[in-house]
């Protein structure tokens, strides 16, 4: 059995193996806090119940590490992939009842908002555990529940919004630099919901059309205002507002766009060699150059400028910062 929330390393020859004998969980959150294990290679005593437990987050770092440095808490790291075997003994305290309840609530949900409420604040690993519990109890995946509750092409937008939530809070999708938060591609159902301010859509609270202009050259510019759903009551942080515009040609293709945020927003964009994460983005502007490429300029709150170049024919990023 895999340890809840713990990544399982390679089981190929040459791995370093140990046995997890006990895991302590936080009674409020249900997340693992301390790990006890037997290490056949020797070293400090971390066995249950008399050994010194290792903080769960440090244990995970040790599992993922390829270095040999130790940690302040005494968790060893290894220079080989790690294989961990978990001895459960069916102990009740190892079961996360919070995720079991969330799996039941998800099964009983009837609409996108209810589904997403069950997933709020949960990481990818927690949602994977919910899915495991759900499959054991109901014989099908969380995604199958979504498909069954919201069938039909007219519900595609709502299904997509739940699919995004199922990726977990620690999974951030890399965006086309021409399509930053607020200017992503939305289907008809999503656009209707955004205009009506009828619930969140892929992280947006709402987005309303404020005007359209015929530019006289076959292009038309549409302007928007909206809010990103990123408020935090405890830290007195309110939803981030934005103003945006898109210019489309006669065929409906976007040839220019711009969005400005009233407070900085962290974003992750596609690059030529993997994702490019930019902190505190204040504006994103795209223009088509003389070569027919889309040139996107991302500006940070500190004034720093990042430039991406995309070939619109292939929808491929051909130039990105630092790559």
Image (spheres, rainbow, N blue to C red):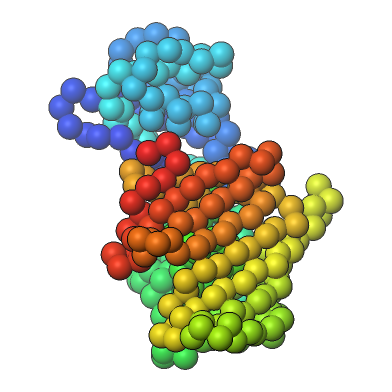
Vertically, is 221 above or below 290?
below
Q: Quick one: 143 or 38, which is closer to the camera?
A: 143
Residue 235: tell me if it is visible: yes
Say which residue appears at 58% left-offset and 34% top-offset. Answer: 33
Say which residue appears at 49% left-offset and 47% top-offset. Answer: 307
Say which residue appears at 27% left-offset and 22% top-offset. Answer: 80
The image quarter containing residue 242 is bottom right
Q: Quick one: 279 or 11, which is closer to the camera?
A: 279
Quadrant of the image for the N terminus? top left
Vertically, is 73 above or below 11?
above
Left or right for 185, reference 199: left
Q: Quick one: 168 or 286, which is closer to the camera?
A: 286
Left or right for 6, reference 158: left
Residue 125 place in picture, x, y as percent: 46, 49
Residue 298 place in picture, x, y as percent: 56, 50
Residue farthest to the left? 13
Residue 61 place in picture, x, y as percent: 45, 28
Residue farthest to the right? 236
């Amino acid at each position: 059995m895999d340890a809840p929330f713990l990544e399982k390393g390679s089981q190929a020859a040459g791995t370093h193996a140990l046995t997890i004998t006990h895991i302590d969980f936080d009674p409020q959150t249900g997340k693992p806090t301390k790990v006890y294990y037997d290490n056949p290679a020797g070293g400090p005593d971390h066995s249950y119940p008399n050994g010194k437990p290792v903080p769960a987050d440090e244990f995970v770092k040790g599992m993922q590490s390829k270095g040999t440095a130790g940690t302040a808490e005494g968790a060893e790291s290894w220079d080989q992939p790690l294989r961990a075997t978990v001895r459960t003994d069916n102990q009740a305290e190892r079961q996360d009842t919070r995720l079991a309840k969330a799996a039941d609530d998800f099964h009983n949900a009837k609409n996108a908002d209810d589904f997403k409420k069950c997933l709020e604040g949960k990481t990818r690993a927690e949602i994977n555990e919910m899915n495991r519990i759900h499959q054991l109890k109901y014989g099908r995946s969380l995604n199958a529940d979504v498909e069954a509750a919201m069938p039909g092409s007219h519900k595609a937008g709502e299904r997509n919004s739940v699919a995004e939530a199922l990726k977990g809070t620690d999974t951030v999708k890399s965006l086309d630099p021409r399509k930053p938060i607020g200017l992503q591609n939305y289907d008809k159902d999503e656009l209707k919901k955004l205009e009506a301010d009828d619930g969140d859509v892929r992280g947006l609270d709402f987005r309303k059309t404020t005007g359209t202009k015929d530019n006289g050259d076959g292009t038309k510019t549409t302007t928007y205002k909206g809010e990103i759903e990123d408020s935090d009551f405890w830290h007195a942080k309110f939803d981030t507002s934005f103003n945006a515009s898109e210019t489309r040609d006669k065929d409906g293709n976007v040839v220019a766009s711009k969005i400005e945020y009233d407070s900085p927003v962290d974003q992750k964009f596609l690059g030529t060699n993997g994702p490019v994460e930019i902190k505190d983005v204040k504006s994103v502007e795209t223009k088509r150059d003389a070569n027919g490429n889309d040139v996107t300029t991302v500006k940070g709150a500190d004034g720093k400028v990042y430039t991406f170049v995309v070939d619109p024919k292939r929808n491929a990023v051909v130039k990105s910062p630092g790559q």
